[in-house]
Image (cartoon, helix red, strand yellow):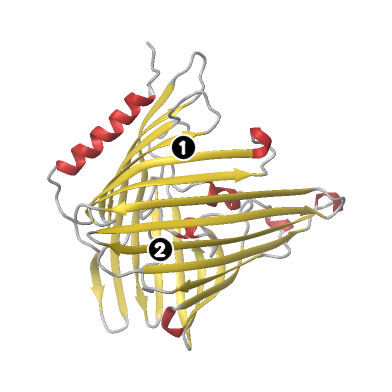
């Protein structure tokens, strides 16, 4: 049986299910977690995130073909609260259930304690996102496209991973107009005995509009957001031989605008990250850059958000075309109750492949 699916068929499936979701009557959910306990100096709140998904992926199999995968991409049980003056967050995950080629197992996704030190400065310790890349710091529950892109995958390969263990200082200036973070982190891709010096990572966010909830790809209401972020990271790796020792350094800049425009909301974000590896012996270098530009328009009483996103990677020796990859995503989000209950879908158009459409994803989400 020929399992090949044309680009027109893939687009038809995506559009059809999005329209079905838009016209269906759906139950409502709470906008936050369930408050279990609260007193003057203690509290506990529980939450859940569930993301069932359908994926179509072109795989270049013998004779051509398409992988179809029905999966639970993310299942998360969440808890947060406070103890005295300290806040805590804990998230347990089982991701990729029934995903082709995946062996899902339960693991901690987030687990940290944050304590105030005074004068607007906090210290955070545990497992959480490093302060690098807006795309990476924006939760995958609040992304414009269904998944993150190359602009955060490139630094991730150097150890700037989604969640790592570390300790950081963080604070706000001028009521939150400027937010800064600097910390020391593990590098989960480097053997521990080679990490004499931990990874140093820092970020500065400048907020010219609203100062709340800056890390999401759709806001609701009438406020305006204008944010610019600068971040950098450095780590020296001492291997057994001088020829195997190297330094990892990375830097990036990103920005986001989300404003009301008539009866709509217009969202634009962009990001550029550069990663460099320098070997201690010789002049060998490995320099890779990744950039992203995305835009969406929130219409129909702030319920439907068509979007487009362009990702580009340059300098990677493993890529064809002189180390360059161009990927465009086109899709839409349908919000039943903000990010708490929504449908997402997109198609991937990758340059220099034999297919007009290289993949499609459709996902539902409950998050509270």
For label 1, the crowd category at 10 Å Cα-Cα, with few meaning under 14, some 14 to 19 and many 20 or more, is few
User: Which residue is at 49% across, 56% downward?
Assistant: 270
Residue 44: % across, % down: 30, 70
For label 2, the crowd category at 10 Å Cα-Cα, with few meaning under 14, some 14 to 19 and many 20 or more, is some
**124 sits left or right of 84 in the view:** right
The secondary element bearing badge 1 is classed as: loop
User: Which residue is at 62% across, 39% downward?
Assistant: 324
| Quarter the N terminus occupies | top left
Q: Eyeballing the image, is 225 above or below 169?
A: above
Residue 219: % across, % down: 31, 62
Q: Nearer the viewer, residue 34 or 250?
A: 250
Q: Which residue lies furthest to the top in this view?
A: 1
Q: Which residue lies furthest to the front in this view?
A: 262
| Quarter the C terminus occupies | bottom left
The secondary element bearing badge 2 is classed as: strand
**Which circle, 1 or 2, is nearer the viewer?**
2
Q: Residue under circle 2?
A: 257
User: Which residue is at 41% across, 34% downward?
Assistant: 99
**72 sits left or right of 264 in the view:** right
Q: Residue under circle 1?
A: 103
């Amino acid at each position: 049986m020929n399992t090949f699916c044309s680009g027109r068929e893939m687009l038809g499936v995506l559009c059809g299910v999005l329209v079905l979701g838009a016209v269906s009557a759906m139950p409502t959910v709470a906008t936050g977690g369930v408050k279990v306990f609260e007193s003057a100096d203690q509290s506990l709140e529980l939450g859940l995130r569930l993301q069932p998904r359908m994926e179509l992926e072109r795989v270049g199999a013998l004779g051509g073909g398409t992988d179809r995968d029905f999966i639970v991409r993310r299942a998360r049980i969440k808890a947060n609260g406070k103890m005295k003056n300290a806040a805590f967050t804990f998230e347990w995950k089982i991701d990729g259930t029934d995903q082709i080629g995946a062996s899902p197992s339960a693991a901690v996704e987030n687990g940290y304690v944050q304590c105030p030190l005074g004068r607007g400065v906090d210290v955070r310790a545990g497992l959480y996102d490093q302060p690098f890349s807006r795309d990476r710091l924006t939760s995958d529950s609040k992304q414009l496209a269904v998944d993150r892109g190359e602009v955060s995958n490139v630094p991730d390969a150097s150890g700037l991973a989604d969640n790592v263990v570390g300790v950081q200082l963080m604070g706000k200036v001028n009521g939150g107009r400027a937010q800064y973070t600097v910390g020391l982190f593990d590098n989960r891709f480097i053997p521990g005995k080679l990490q004499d010096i931990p990874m140093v990572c820092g970020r500065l966010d400048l907020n010219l509009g609203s100062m709340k909830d800056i890390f999401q790809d759709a806001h609701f209401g009438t406020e305006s957001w204008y944010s610019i972020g600068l971040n950098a990271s450095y780590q020296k790796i001492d291997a057994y031989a001088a020829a195997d020792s190297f330094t990892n350094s990375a830097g990036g800049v990103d920005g986001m605008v989300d404003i009301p425009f008539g009866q709509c909301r217009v969202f634009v974000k962009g990001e550029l990250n550069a990663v460099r590896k320098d070997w201690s012996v010789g002049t060998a270098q490995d320099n890779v850059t990744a950039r992203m530009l995305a835009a969406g328009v929130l219409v129909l009483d702030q319920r439907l958000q068509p979007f487009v996103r362009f990702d580009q990677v340059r300098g990677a020796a493993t890529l064809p075309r002189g180390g360059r990859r161009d990927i465009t995503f086109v899709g839409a989000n349908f919000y039943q109750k903000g990010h708490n209950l929504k449908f997402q879908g997109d198609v991937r158009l990758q340059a220099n492949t034999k297919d007009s459409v290289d993949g499609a994803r459709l996902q539902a989400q409950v998050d509270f």
